[in-house]
Image: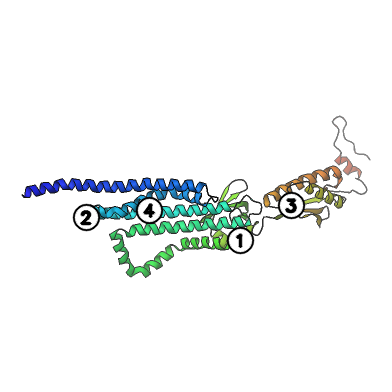
Amino acid sequence: MGAMTSHTESMALPETLFKDLLIFFGALLSGYFGARLVLRLVVRWARHTSTNLDDVVLRHLRQPLSVLIPLIVLRTVQHAIHFPPTFRETFLSVYAILLIIVLAWLFLRANRAIEEHVKNRFDLSQGDNLQARAIHTQISTLKNIVGFVVVLVAAASILMTFERVRQLGLSLLASAGVAGIVIGFAAQRSIATLLAGIQLALTQPIRIDDVVIVENEWGRIEEITLTYVVVRIWDLRRLVVPITYFIDKPFQNWTRKSAEILGTVNFYTDYTISVDEVRAELERLVSSSDLWDRKVCGLQVTDTSERTMTLRALVSASDSGKAWDLRCLVREKLVAFISKRWPESLPRTRAEIEGGLNPRAQAAATPPSSTTPAAIPS
């Protein structure tokens, strides 16, 4: 009788195991294909809408949702699966870890989708892009902060799923004060860097695409992270600067309020030049150039010395790049104009000799002939 009972149980065990595996994989497959079908229908619907927000969100969230929905379906039917107690505990632990990872993945992709949507609304290629640069800076910094917090919370949640780690954490609560002090000193620079990144996002001394002078280098802000800032220098080099630099040290920001800027060109000429004609030529020159913003154009005598006088041409442009090109154009054309019109007014050194040279000095200054010996007149 006992043999027949054991034989019946051994026959029932494979049937139960087969049923449990069928429910398990059926839930995963149905959830996966159901998610794909629903997402495909939603994508088709999103293509006919006027806004691109749903397109951006679906493009970023499609993959994590394709994994999250099967896990949710599996969770709803897990009570119908009769796993052995030891295997069931392992299954629940693995399921919790996978769910935490997928949720963190979903939040990170949603964070990136929001960043992309906001940046698409504010174009940096426009001429007056002050608001766009401010928004790009804030959203980039906030995206990094949110990503850091999501990863930190996910890692802590995964560690807390293990019983030994949880017990270790409870045992360390008694010495939390000392541990907090030690960790505070060890992470002082990291915390300061994080706070500097948050302060930079709120106060915005720099923004994405700002023109700055850092370490005597001219460039544009290309990237702002939680720990460093990348400056694209004019010759396409990249200057990587700690983010605390822009909090602790002075620097030049040429586009803090607007991109407009004044450019100067200095000329050193003789006193005999006609300043009015040079001024008229400067006005004619900048008026025919698209680089000038039609606001500031002037020529002044800013300095004089015993040999020359200094003429300063002051012109304005809509941004620093155009101002540089305009300065080069003014310098080149005005030098050519002065050289052609008043070649005698270019800087020169004068020397006047009164009474002429005495005979001996004149003979010394005259080279002897190769055929006739030099003679000193009496």
**How far apart in space, not on screen, are marks 4 and 3 (Cα)?**
54 Å
The reply to whether residue 222 is in sight is: no
Residue found at x 52% / y 57%: 141
* Mark closest to the chain's N terminus, 4 or 2: 2
Q: Amino acid at mark 1?
A: Pro
Tag 3 residue: 293
Q: Position of residue 305 (x, y in %)?
A: 82, 56
Residue sitting nearer the eye, 8 or 144: 8
- Quadrant housing the C terminus: top right
**How far apart in space, not on screen, are marks 4 and 1 (Cα)?**
43 Å
Q: Which quadrant of the figure has residue 162?
A: bottom left
Q: Which quadrant of the figure has residue 216?
A: bottom right
Tag 2 residue: 85
Eye-nearest disc, 2 or 3: 2
Mark 1 residue crowding within 10 angstroms, few (<14) / some (14–19) / many (20+): few
**How far apart in space, not on screen, are marks 2 and 3 (Cα)?**
78 Å
Q: Amino acid at mark 3?
A: Asp
Q: Position of residue 178 (x, y in %)?
A: 37, 69
* Mark closest to the chain's N terminus, 2 or 1: 2
Residue found at x 46% / y 63%: 188
Q: Amino acid at mark 2?
A: Pro
The reply to whether residue 87 is in sight is: yes
* Mark closest to the chain's N terminus, 4 or 3: 4
Residue found at x 88% / y 40%: 363
* Mark closest to the chain's N terminus, 4 or 1: 4
**How far apart in space, not on screen, are marks 4 and 2 (Cα)?**
25 Å
Q: Which quadrant of the figure has residue 156?
A: bottom left
In this figure, which colouring scheme has been used for the structure? rainbow
For the residue labelled by badge 3, is the local secondary structure a helix, a strand or a loop? loop
Tag 1 residue: 250
Tag 4 residue: 101
